[in-house]
Amino acid sequence: MAVQNNLTWYKATAGVQPFTIDPVEDISTWSIVFTMRRNQEDANPPLLTKACGILDGPNGTFTLTLTKAETTLPAGTYYYDVQRDNSGGEDVLSIGTFTIIQEVKTP
């Protein structure tokens, strides 16, 4: 079952977002993909598609690592999902909004 997570990220900032599936199960052999779109109904291709890394497979923890370039998008609200991508095991693990906040610049 998908977990609703609304994420907030500063524009043009690299970082790592951890996730834990619920209920916890061993995800050691899973392939997990993050997809982000401006609007939920937007056609392909998405703005960003990125493989997630397994952090602690037996405890169901994985991470999304984003680079500065990948978060250099106009500030605003986007929509994402994270899905298990193995053949025969396609499941939505997390879904929600992904808000990019404009950084504050000093004059």
Image: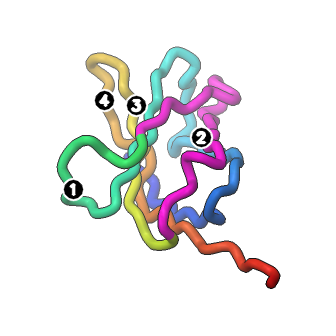
What's the CA distance linking mark 1 and mark 4?
21 Å
What residue would you read off at disc 3? 84
What residue would you read off at disc 2? 64
Labels 2 and 3 touching (C-beta < 8 A): no
Q: Is residue 55 magenta?
A: yes
What's the CA distance linking mark 1 and mark 3?
21 Å
What residue would you read off at disc 4? 90
**Does dot 2 land on a helix, a strand or a loop?**
strand
Going by the image, does 85 lie left or right of 34?
left
Q: Nearer the viewer, mark 2 or mark 3?
A: 2
Mark before the other along the chain sequence, 2 or 1: 1
Residue type, label 2: Leu
Residue 6 in the image: state x and y as whole percent: 51, 65
Q: Magenta residues, as a range?
A: 49-74
The vertical placement of 86 against 96, above or below, is: above
Label placed on residue 42: 1
**Residue at x 55%, y 67% (from the top left corner):** 100
**Residue at x 45%, y 40% (from the top left corner):** 34
Residue 10 in the image: state x and y as whole percent: 65, 65
Residue 98 in the image: state x and y as whole percent: 48, 62
What's the CA distance linking mark 4 and mark 2?
18 Å
**Residue at x 54%, y 24% (from the top left corner):** 27
